[in-house]
């Protein structure tokens, strides 16, 4: 057995004898992954939005002959937000304290302008500052879009009423003015007794106008909704089983595990006072670092496969379509080993710098969360976060797992991420080897 | 003295820890079959010189030479072993790393010789037993030279006597000894030569009788 294998076996034995540590190392990253999932799941949650009614909205509003139940209409269009009616001052206070993420104000004269159907009334929106303000904007826009869709139907109905007056004649009103219209039907009746080429031309026009106006309803509806969405029901993965969630859960789990394990176990060699004994010719410092890198890789492989098997079983039992729950496991194993090794090399570097096991474990824990969150920030939003994240193994592991599990043709992406992981692992391993000399002092 | 090069030699070897000079440039040689006592007050640089000669520390300046093929055992002052392994597992691991042909047998022999308990973890041993395990590990690999940093510090008188009996037997069989001690009696009884360090530098190097007379005069 090689010297590295002897050290690896020794570390595995010590790890097995520390059930509390082992349990925490397994449970903690899974717990963090779950919490991150819940936070990410906030994307599906309803933010609380205040509705300030300064116009005194009535229970029912009649627009273009349509009677709207205001509360029911608001409930119908506010599916993505939790709308609560508040007074102006209370709404402002809750916005400042973060209890509501936005305030939607119905200004005085809103309903009168709306019923006039000549100009568009305005709703005022205030949103909280912060990282979710853009999302709140989107949701408020969605709410107003829903209201507009409801009103469009009424507006179209009202417009069609005027078209019918032109077609058939009768009494109507506009902006409070009453009027009577002869209509195309009346004009046709008047022309029946007339003869000559001019009367014929007028009758032809009335016929053409009838045909054209008969299509007005469809044309107006098409103008209001150039594109419609038809929702097709079908099977697909829920958010919790999506490819990204699985890849991030694996990345987060092995990042925590590999960093803490490698950092703690290397620093523990100094705590046990054995570094000098080993370094006097029994084991080189490079072999010592290599043993920690391998320990992290092996444990990452075991835990990562366990997590992916659970995912795979859920997908299989649930008969969820999409993805490759079992066929890609060998590819995933390669990624787990490479990512575990690269993270282990970074952990060994932290352990060598920290020098004692407690500090090393704490440093590793403190370092791992920023590494993970840097990887979660989209590069399009904060480019600097993306560049920093590219210099750390986490995001390359996540990309590898995602490609290995779900890409139809993953090879180019796998190669690129594998090269990244190997390069970063070699770099951090070399730095760890240099820093490990500090453990001798 | 034979014509062979020394087992271990420090050539102007110095060691600095940060801004503190632990050992000034020092020359020292340990030859086959010698028994040398390294003495001096706390902080004189004795443990540093021992660690440099063992190869457990790298010199900041100068160099340390080890004769080709020479095997060196080193017992640091603070026990160097894995607390979560049993004494047997510690001995077997280091026996394998020392490339012993029969690591299990060597471990068993040393467990008996040092009367180390089985079935407990090294971290649960008493201070004295931990030191005995520390010394037992040092004897693995049939070393040509033993570098011992206050080997009897935590041992009771009986264990101290038995340890010296074992070390004397090894010495008679040709093993060189370099030991740090604070006990004049151990210098008298077991050393052929004395090196005294003071403030990181060699203050005296000579025979035991010369050292005794200097001590009596001083």
Image (cartoon, coloured by chain):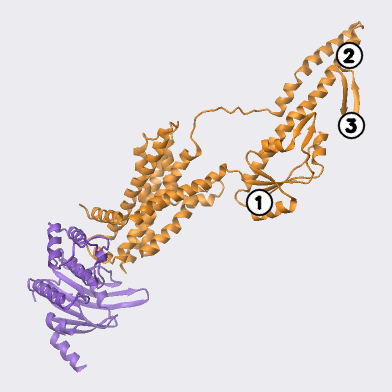
Chain colours: A orange, B purple
| Element marked by disc 1 | loop
The quadrant in which residue B40 appears is bottom left
Q: Is residue B69 visible?
A: no
Q: Residues within 10 Å of mark 1 (few under 14, many from 20)?
A: some
**A338 left or right of A274 in image:** right
**B152 left or right of A344 in image:** left
Which comes before the other along the chain, label 3 or label 2? Answer: 3
- The dot on residue A138 is none
- The dot on residue A128 is 1
The quadrant in which residue B69 appears is bottom left
Q: Position of residue A385 (x, y in %)?
A: 52, 51
Q: Which residue is nearer to you in this view: A53 or A127?
A: A53
Asked if the residue under mark 1 is in contact with the one under mark 2, i.e. CB atoms within 8 Å, the reply is no
- The dot on residue A187 is 2
Q: Position of residue A188 (x, y in %)?
A: 87, 11
Q: Residues within 10 Å of mark 3 (few under 14, many from 20)?
A: few
| Dot 2 and dot 1 within a common chain | yes
Q: Position of residue A87 (x, y in %)?
A: 74, 50
* Residue sitting at x 77%, y 26%: A157
């Amino acid at each position: 057995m090689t010297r590295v294998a002897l050290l690896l076996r020794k570390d595995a034995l010590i790890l097995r004898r520390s059930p509390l540590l082992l349990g925490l190392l397994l449970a903690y990253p899974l717990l963090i992954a779950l919490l991150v999932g819940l936070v990410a799941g906030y994307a599906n949650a309803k933010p609380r939005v205040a509705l300030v009614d300064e116009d005194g909205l009535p229970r029912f509003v009649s627009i273009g002959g349509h009677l709207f139940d205001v509360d029911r209409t608001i409930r119908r269009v506010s599916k993505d937000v939790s709308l609560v009616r508040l007074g102006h001052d209370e709404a402002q206070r809750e916005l400042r304290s973060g209890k509501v993420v936005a305030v939607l104000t119905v200004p005085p004269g809103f309903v009168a302008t709306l019923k006039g159907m000549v100009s568009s009334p305005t709703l005022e929106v205030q949103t909280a500052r912060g990282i979710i303000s853009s999302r709140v904007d989107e949701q408020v826009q969605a709410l107003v879009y829903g209201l507009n869709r409801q009103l469009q139907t009424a507006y179209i109905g009202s417009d069609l009423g005027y078209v019918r007056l032109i077609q058939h004649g009768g009494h109507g009103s506009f902006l409070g003015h009453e009027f009577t219209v002869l209509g195309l039907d009346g004009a046709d009746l008047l022309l029946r007794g007339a003869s000559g080429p001019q009367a014929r031309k007028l009758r032809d026009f009335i016929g053409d106008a009838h045909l054209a106006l008969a299509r007005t309803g469809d044309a107006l509806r098409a103008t209001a909704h150039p594109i419609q969405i038809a929702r097709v029901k079908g099977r697909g993965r829920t958010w919790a089983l999506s490819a990204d969630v699985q890849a991030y859960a694996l990345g987060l789990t092995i990042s925590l595990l590999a960093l803490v394990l490698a950092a703690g176990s290397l620093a523990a060699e100094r705590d046990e006072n054995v570094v000098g004994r080993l370094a006097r010719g029994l084991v080189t410092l490079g072999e010592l670092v290599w043993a920690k890198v391998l320990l992290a890789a092996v444990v990452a492989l075991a835990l990562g496969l366990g997590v992916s098997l659970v995912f795979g079983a859920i997908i299989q039992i649930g008969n969820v379509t999409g993805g490759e729950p079992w066929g890609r496991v060998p590819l995933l194993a390669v990624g787990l080993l490479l990512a575990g090794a690269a993270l282990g090399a970074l952990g060994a570097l932290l352990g060598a710098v920290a020098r004692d096991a407690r500090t090393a474990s704490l440093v590793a824990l403190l370092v791992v969360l920023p590494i993970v969150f840097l990887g979660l920030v989209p590069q399009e939003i904060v480019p600097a976060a993306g560049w920093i994240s590219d210099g750390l193994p986490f995001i390359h592991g996540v990309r590898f797992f995602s490609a290995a599990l779900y890409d139809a043709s993953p090879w180019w992406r796998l190669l690129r991420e594998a090269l990244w992981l190997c390069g970063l692992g070699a770099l951090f391993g070399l730095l760890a080897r240099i820093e490990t000399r500090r453990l001798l002092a | 003295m034979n014509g062979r090069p020394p087992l271990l030699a420090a050539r102007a070897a110095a060691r600095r820890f940060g801004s503190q000079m632990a050992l000034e440039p020092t020359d020292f040689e340990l030859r086959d079959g010698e028994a040398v006592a390294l003495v001096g007050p706390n902080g004189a640089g004795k443990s540093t010189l021992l660690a440099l000669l063992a190869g457990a520390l790298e010199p900041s300046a100068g160099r340390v030479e080890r004769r080709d093929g020479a095997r060196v055992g080193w017992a640091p002052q603070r026990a160097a072993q894995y607390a979560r392994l049993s004494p047997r597992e510690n001995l077997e691991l280091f026996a394998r790393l020392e490339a012993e042909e029969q690591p299990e047998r060597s471990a068993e022999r040393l467990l008996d010789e040092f009367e180390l308990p089985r079935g407990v973890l090294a971290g649960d041993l008493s201070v004295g037993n931990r030191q005995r395990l520390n010394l037992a590990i040092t004897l693995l690999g049939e070393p040509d030279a033993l570098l011992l940093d206050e080997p009897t510090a935590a041992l009771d008188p009986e264990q101290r006597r038995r340890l010296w009996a074992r070390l004397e037997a090894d010495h008679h069989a040709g093993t060189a000894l370099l030991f740090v001690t604070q006990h004049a009696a151990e210098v008298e009884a077991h050393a052929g030569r004395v090196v005294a360090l003071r403030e990181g530098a060699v203050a005296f190097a000579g025979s035991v009788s010369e050292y005794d007379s200097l001590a009596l005069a001083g």
